[in-house]
Amino acid sequence: MISFSGVGKSFGDNQVLRELDLGVAAGEKVSIIGPSGSGKTTILRLLMTLEEPDTGLVAVDGEPLWDRRGGAVVDAKRQAAVRRKIGMVFQHFNLFPHMTVLNNVMLSPVRVLGMSRDEAEQRAVELLQLVGLEKHLGHKPGQLSGGQQQRVAIARALAMRPKVMLFDEVTSALDPELIGEVLNVIRDLARTTAMTMLLVTHEMRFAEEISDRVLMFDGGQIVESGPPSTIFQNPQHDRTQRFLKAVL
Ligand code: ADP
């Protein structure tokens, strides 16, 4: 479902991704862990077409999203179609502050997918029930807690019926007592949906619990990849051992 092959990305002199090769199977739930500044978020931002790679190929669902081999360019329309298969939840919610919760979730299905307002509303209400916010349909984001806002952001991403969901440190801007409610929603999604999920997280216990596979990332490369039981209980690589010792 997701494939990176020989992907490189630099910001000026700062080489953030080095010849990255990464494949994620359809339905697989994969967590990326590793030190801050190691390039984890850049992987997600390339998939959202918020950044472009310098080299290599990124493909989603068998179709190229970026192709930087030999000057090839992916047609903008094709790229947009591939990009629509992907939903992302950001660290800082990124909700529209002037719109109600319901309208935040309805907006893209109506504008981008051309869904009727009735259908979009029905679906938005269902999704807001799923994340436990059916009582807040008419509220503005500013009237909600951070945890509630992040659950709206999850519902909003799901409303586009993505095949792939990306979660970028979605609890790091939250007060500690609000983290659990957001992780519970993501845990339920991981258990009950066939969506492919790629998460960047600092919540090690959560990553251990919900992931099929965990990637330890450092210095622009995958240091170690394996089932959570191996990565957390019996890490093979010295860099993984040191990282986990520092954060657990
Ligand atoms: P992580 O998610 O592992 O913390 P990031 O992918 O956010 O790491 O960032 C990797 C490195 O790239 C960092 O040094 C960061 O400062 C740098 N970086 C990220 N985005 C940009 C940008 N748009 N412009 C310049 N530098 C950036």
Image (cartoon, grey):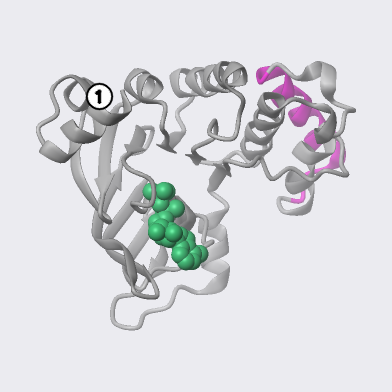
Q: Please tell me whether residue 64 belongs to the stretch shown in magenta.
A: no
Residue at position x 30%, y 26% from top? 212
Q: Quadrant of the N terminus?
A: top left
Q: Is residue 63 visible?
A: no
- Percent position of residue 177, x then y: 60, 16
Residue 243 quadrant? top left
Residue at position x 86%, y 34% from top? 140
Q: Is residue 40 left or right of residue 88?
A: left
Q: Main secondary structure of the magenta part?
A: helix
Magenta residues (range): 114-131
- Percent position of residue 235, x then y: 14, 28
Q: Is residue 183 left or right of residue 210?
A: right
Residue marked by disc 1: 228
Q: Is residue 231 left or right of residue 7?
A: left
Residue 211 quadrant? top left
Residue at position x 80%, y 28% from top? 122
Q: Is residue 134 left or right of residue 87?
A: right
Using the image as rendered, state which of residue 233 and residue 63 is in the foreground.
233
User: Badge 1 local density, few (<14 within 10 Å), some, or many (20+)?
Assistant: many
Q: Is residue 79 visible?
A: yes
Using the image as rendered, state which of residue 226 and residue 245 is in the foreground.
245
Q: Please tell me whether residue 117 belongs to the stretch shown in magenta.
A: yes
- Percent position of residue 51, x then y: 49, 64
